[in-house]
Structures are given as C-alpha cells and as structure tokens.
Image (spheres, grey):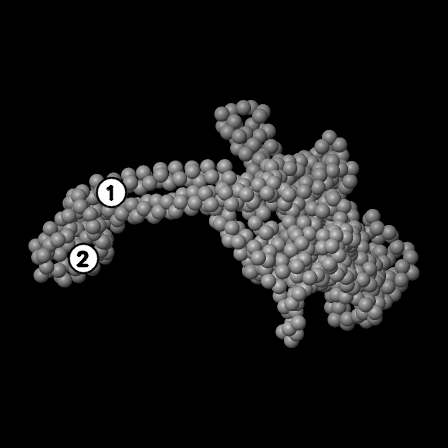
Amino acid sequence: MVDVGTTLEIAQASQAGMSAVGAGLAVGLTGIGSGIAEMGIGAAAVGATAENRDMFGLALLFTVIPETIVIFGLVVALLLLF
Amino acid sequence: MLRPERMCRLLIAAPKGEIETIIKELYRHNVYHIEDFVPESSSDALSIGHPLADASDAASALIKVRAIENACGIDPGNVEAKTKLPVAKVRKRIQTDLPAIQKEAEELVGSRSRLDARQKEHEQRARELEPFVAVPLDLEFYRGYARFTVFAGHITHDVDIGVPNEKFFSGGVPGNMIVVVVPNEHREQVERTLLDAGFQAIPIPEENGAPADRMKAHLEEARRIEAEIAAINGKIAGIREKHTDFLVACDELLTADVERAEAPLRFATTEETFITEGWVPEAQADQIRNTLEKATGGKIYIEELEIDDDTAVPVEYENPSFATPTQMLMDIYARPRYSEIDPTLMVAIVFPIFFGFILGDVGYGAILLALSLGLRKIITGDEGRMLLKVLSYASISSIIFGLLYSEIFGSSLPWPSLLYSRHLNIGGAAAAGHGPQVAELMIVAIWIGILHITLGRVIGMLNARRIYHGKHATKAVISNAGWISVMWGIILIIWSLYAIPLMPDLTGFPGAGTIGAILLVAGIIGIAQENPLEIVELPTIISHVLSYARLVAVGLSSVAIAMVVNYIAIGMMIQPQLEAITPVGVILIIVGILVLLMGHMLNTALGLLGGGLHSIRLHYVEFFTKFYKGGGKKYNPFGMKSKFTEE
C-alpha cells in the first residue's frame, strides 16, 4: 500500500494517527459493551433494591462487574497512546 | 480488631415476680441482645409471655405524642439535643401538659384542614366561572326557562345555528366559549350542529350576578383563607418552637416504656417463671450477671450456654476508632460472620490509599475535604456522618497523593512528580516536565493487585480453618493455597518469558518457567480437589489482577479531563484575550472562567464517583470474593442510648 510519494514522516504521522483511532475504538466499543451489559443488570438491581434496601451493596456489586470491560479498553488505549 | 467482638450466650431464668426488675436492669445496661422465643407447636410447657401491665397506656400515650409530632412536623431523628430533661419531670408533664398541647395541636390541624378544603372549593368555583366571564350575561339568565334550551360550552369554532336563536361566541378564552339559546323544538337539531363542531358542554354554575364579579369574589375569599392558613401555620410553628424539647423527650421516654413493657413477648414463660436467651459481649458478661443477681436478691438463674452455630451469633464490630466509619462500607456489602476475620481495618487503610492513587490532586482533595467537613453540619444521620468521615480520610489521602504526583486542578505544582508522573501532554502542558509514565504506573497498579489478591487468599486460608470443620476445612485451605499457587505460577512463567520493567527479570533463568509451570499444575490440582467446577473460574485470576489497572486508568482519565478544561478555558479563551483587552475579549474571559469553574466542578463530582466507586469495587469484587462470607446478624442490644432524657 506504500505510495511512491510516501516519505518517512508521513508514514510515522499516519502510524500515530492510526494508533489514536485504535485507542478511540478501544474505549468507545468497550464503553458500548459495558453499557449494554450494565443495562440489564442495573435495571434488575434497582428493582431488587426497591424491594429490599439491604440488597443495595450486592446490587451495586453486580452492576459494576461489567465495568471491567471498559477499564480494559481504557488500559489498551493508554498503552497505545503512550 | 480483625475479628468481631466476642459474645457470650446467656440463659436467664427467674420467677415471674422479678420480671420487671430484670427487664429494667437489662434495659438500663443496653448490652443484652434478646434472642426471640419461638414457641414449638408440639410442646405446650413454654409459651410466649404477656406484656407488662402499663403497656397499653404507654402505647396510647406514645401514639398521641407521635400524632402531635407529625402535625407539627417534628422528626426526633433530626432534632439536636440541647438539654436532657429529667425523667421524673417529663413523666409529670405527660400527665399535666400533654393533653393541653394535644388539644391545641389537634384543633389547629383540624381547622387548617377545614380551611384547606374551603380554599380549594372557592378556587374550584372560580375556575368554573372563568369561561363565563367572556359572555356578557348574568348567571341567572342561563336557567329557569320552560320553552328554551340553553347550551353552554367549549367549541372548536363559531358555527351558524340555522334556526331562530340567540348566540354568544367568544374566541378569547382557551377552547373558545359558546352560549346558544334556542326554542325547545329545535333542541336536537342544534345539539347535532354543535356536536359536529366539537362542542363540549360545561356545567353552568349555580350562582347569580355577573360572572366576573362572582369570580373575583371567590378568588378574594380564597386569598383571605390562605392568609388564615398562614396564621395557623404560624401558630403550629409556635408549638413546635415551644414544645419540641418536651415532645421528643416524651417520645423517647414512652418508646422506652413500650419497649420495656413489651419485652415479655420475646420471653418464654411457664406458670410461675420466665426464661430468656440472649447475647452479651464477653467483656460485660460478668458485670451484667452481678447486677442482675444483686437486683433480684439472688432469685435468678443465669447460665452461660455454649455457642454451637456461629451464624446465630449477633455480630458487633470491634475496631480502632479511625476504622469505625468504614464499618458503614462493610454493612453495605454484608456484616461479617461471627467466626470469620473482620476485614474492616484493612479496608479502612487500603480504601483511602486507592482513592488517593486514583484522584491524586491537591485541589480536588481540598474541595472534597472542605465538602465533607461542611456537610457534617447539614447531614445529621449516623450513616451519613460515617460516610462523610470516610470521605474526609479519602480526601486527605488524595491531597497527599496530589503532593506526590505534583498535581493541582490538573496543572503541576512547583516541583516535579515524586512518584511516576501523570502529566499528560495536553495543550503542551507537560512540555516542561516529565511526560506521563503510563507503563510504569500500570505495573505499579498490577503489583498492588497481585499483593492485594494474595492477601485476600491468605485470609481465605485462615477463614477456611475458622468457618469449616474437619476435612472440609483442610480442603478449603488447600484450595485457597492452590489459587495463590496458580497465580504466582502464571506470574513466574510470564517473568521467565518477558522482561518487564519494575518486575524481576527471569528471562535468563530457564528454571523459573519450569517452577512456574509446576506451581500452576499443582495449584490447579489443589483447586480441583475441593470442587472441580471451580476450574472454569481460572481466567478470573488474570482478569482480577488486570482489573487493578483501573487505579491508573480511571485516575489518568480524571487528569486528562482536568487538563483539557484548563487548556480550553485558560489556554484557548482567557490567555489570548489578556494580551490585548477588547470588549468582546472581556466577555470571552468571563465565559472562560465559567467554563473553568463548571469543568472542575464536573470533574470533582466525576472524581468522587470514580475514585470512590472504583476503590470500593476493587474491595467488594476483587478482594472480598477471595475470602469473605458475610451474613452476620446485627448486634442489637435491648435498651436505648437516651438522647433527650436523663434519670
């Protein structure tokens, strides 16, 4: 895919750009994933907490479990950028 | 420390004649957790006791007091105790003053609700009259005809009736207003015409005179009543002002009376005696035993029973005072079981460190510290206060980490970062100092994770020996050791393959990988011997350790937001305008300051949420799941800490 006119600088710049796009995708897509996962859990957790206040701790715990997905995305993004 | 307070299980038996004395003593000491007596259907030797004689009197007086409190809007939970009233005086005033206060409050509330109803009625009438104001007809002309029919109501548009009629139309009111008077013989035809135009009849008010005057009269009346209500509210506020101290004291005293009088409902009784079982902290057991014996003159039998089931024991924390607020965080998850290790102290130390690691910023830390100290005046509940204390410890840690990271509101302090730098290169902010050392920070976070999880598993081994017995205990201990061994096996294998900064470089030692593999296999066998299904959980070892990377990731995102806010507000809006001040520039500077304030406010809230939730989540999900069972009953001693009264 290397053009005749491609210089080293352009190649490096596009590499940096690509890694930025990759970082964005990593955070964005994992964010969507966490969101979808937490959607169902969160709704059920709020319901359970409304029925019984003591459930709050456990409900919070269940809700934040998928959070790990986006954290992994964030970690990958940071490693890509720096 | 590290385990709940030791409890003693006591069985108390005494003749029924002593029941009042014993209840009184137990209540006064406020340490005896009553185990409710549940009668067995098969045996009729023991039955539930009867409440003491004065139970119903105290209960009905309490209902009265609560009713007055309700009417005056007094919540004893939110009342600050100024002085403690002596019990004898309160008892006397319950006889003398309470009926009068009750009567006054009842009358005021009664007349207020009557006035409320009247005010509503007048307002309703005024609303009904409103459409008729648009029609220049007195109200008596709308009714009382033998040969005519009157239609009055809303309509979408003016219509041509087509028969002899008299008609008023007004488009000036919402929904328009039409009044048509027709002879009775055309009634049906006109009704159809009107309905086709979307006619909606409205009731004609049963009043006389001009609608506008009547409406004004009703509104004036409503306003007058409102003033009366305000006056009554003032009087009720007067009662609240004058009697709050007395009322909350009554509430407390009578609640205590009722609790004491109803205590026999939780005891087992025979014809002549009663028996109760309960729990007392070991340290107070002897004292309570002596006082009871002295009070009854020896007519009592107290025996210390053996504890056979640790789930039945009520659990009370025993922690140094700085760790007590953290008990709140424990209770949100679950109170520890009686025989397991109570990790409150570890959470109390590690939670603020995690919080500071994530939100290490002098500025945000100071804001949160001020917030937690300031809110203490507003939030009076016990739980809220404890949370605020936890927050204040966390924010102090945040300030300390901010000094180490050299961060204040996203910009740097005069010195370079003493830990690894988190300064990102946003808008050239980090050009002067070190760039961000993300990889190093990440590895530090992973180290924290490895150690934290290892600690969790070690506690798991200790807990297994306390909770389970015999073979099961050994198996559980080996399984926990297996988890540690698998984790360290994987780590050794990784170290032998890759050289990672800040971690031992074992690439030169081929033996390390072999040892790692042996540990891995041995660990898996150790896990499988307790429960083979646990093998499917093996990947969590890696995901849980990596999960600690959030300490850096969440922190960096908060740094990034702060720096972006600074760059937009200061770098892009304020600074360029300061060089040459123009009228437009001044506005831009003001907008820039607003952006700066809003941005940092938002980031403080995000930092609090991110720092707090992620730190506690690391405890709940990654740490507690390794060893913590929870599910202990709350220790709830029979008695009351008096807040408003004194003996």
Q: Quadrant of the C terminus of chain B?
A: top right
Q: Which residue is at the front of the view, B486 or B167?
A: B167
Of residue A39 and residue B380, the one placed in the foreground of this image is B380
At 72% across and 55% down in the image, what residue appears? B296
Q: Relative to B259, is B630 on the left or the right?
A: right
Which residue shows up at 38% across the image and 44% down it?
B112
- B358 lies above or below B289: above
Q: Are marks 1 and 2 on the same chain?
A: yes
| Mark 1–mark 2 distance (CA, rounded to whole Å) | 27 Å
The residue that label 1 is drawn on is B215
Query: Residue B466 location in percent, x, y?
Result: 80, 62
> What is the three-letter code of the residue carrying label 2?
Leu
Which one is nearer the viewer's eye here, A24 or B377?
B377
In this orientation, does residue A37 appear? no
* Closer-to-camera residue (B223/B292): B292
Residue underneath mark 2:
B194
Q: Position of residue A66 (x, y in %)?
A: 64, 58
Quadrant position of residue B51: bottom right
